[in-house]
Amino acid sequence: MPNDFNQPIIDEFRANRGRMSGYFEGARLLLLTTTGARTGTPHTTPVGYLPDNGDRVLVIASAAGSARHPDWFHNLVAHPQVTVESGSFTYEARAVVLTGEERDEVFARAVEADPGWAAYQEKTTRVIPVVALHSLAQGGPGTINATSFGEAIKVVHDAFRRELSLIRAELASTASSSTTTLGAQLRVNCLTFCQGLHNHHTGEDTMLFPHIAEQHPTATPALTRLREEHERIATLVEELRETLTSTTDPAAVRTEVERLTTALEAHLTYEEEELIPLFDTAA
């Protein structure tokens, strides 16, 4: 069972699909459910995470610099299959403890993004573990935490909105600091978002939109417009990728992110206005 400190965080996280208030507002959190190393019972813990390219996210077993690894780390070492709740999605994952240069490179990225990780390492003699959580979901990001197709569209869209908002906030913080180069983790955040958006639009073009066209022929004009917008957004995504690989200037990246944000928000809003009523009517 979650402890008294964690339970309110878990409840708020689930109620608001990952959006938190107070101390954790704007934080990247997930709920990690592990199997007890000794008891075999499930334990759910809120943990911070780092986006990473590919099918994995990264978590750090800091325990705030405690002399001992957190219980959830011991659990996943004993039972590597875990459940991850991102707020919008729930999926099974395989936990892999990073070692050697890979661990050090990821931890350095984390410290660059948030010096608090370094402060935790300085408080303890243990090497703070970094764990990769590899999604085991097939054909998508996992189970969408929604009760209808219409709600699922909004939930997925809001996940993209939230991640883009976090990236924009991180870029804004570079403008208000003495930082003159783009951090490695922030670059990874942007590239991960780009890949996720590409995957989402590809799935819509190849699966969702053909299904809607078959069930609702009157939606054809809207679907045509949405596909055209996918192409324009894909161009903006590629321009952002090119900027990320060609410069470390945060201002240049901010410009491309703002262009993408404007186009994407208009696209998501139009899609919700046109498609959600179709599913609601069918329901």
Image (spheres, rainbow, N blue to C red):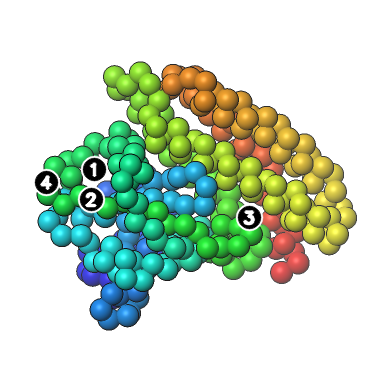
Distance of label 4 from label 1 (alpha carbons): 10 Å
Where does the N terminus fall, quadrant-wise? bottom left
Q: Residues within 10 Å of mark 3 (few under 14, many from 20)?
A: some
Ranked by sequence position, the earlier of labels 4 and 1 is 1
Q: Nearer the viewer, mark 4 or mark 3?
A: 4
What's the residue at 48%, 66% (across, down)? 92
Mark carried by residue 117: 1
Res 270 quadrant in image: top right
What's the residue at 37%, 63% (across, down)? 32
Left or right: 275 in relation to 144: right
Left or right: 236 in relation to 179: right
What's the residue at 38%, 21% (across, down)? 181
Residue 213 vs 174, above or below: the answer is below
Measuring from the top left, give residue 77's x and y in whole percent: 31, 66
Secondary structure under badge 1? helix
Which one is in front, 19 or 84?
84
Measuring from the top left, give residue 71's x and y in whole percent: 24, 66
From this viewpoint, which residue is outermost toward the right?
217
Q: Which residue is mark 4?
A: 123
Is there CB contact under 8 Å for labels 1 and 2? yes
Is there CB contact under 8 Å for labels 3 and 2? no
Secondary structure under badge 4? loop
Residue 163 vs 139, above or below: the answer is above
Q: Which residue is mark 2?
A: 128
Residue 13 appears in the picture as rendered:
no
Secondary structure under badge 2? loop
Measuring from the top left, give residue 117's x and y in whole percent: 24, 43
Q: Amino acid at mark 4?
A: Lys
Which one is in front, 97 or 193?
97
Residue 233 vs 85, above or below: the answer is above
Q: Which residue is mark 3?
A: 153
Q: Amino acid at mark 2?
A: Ile
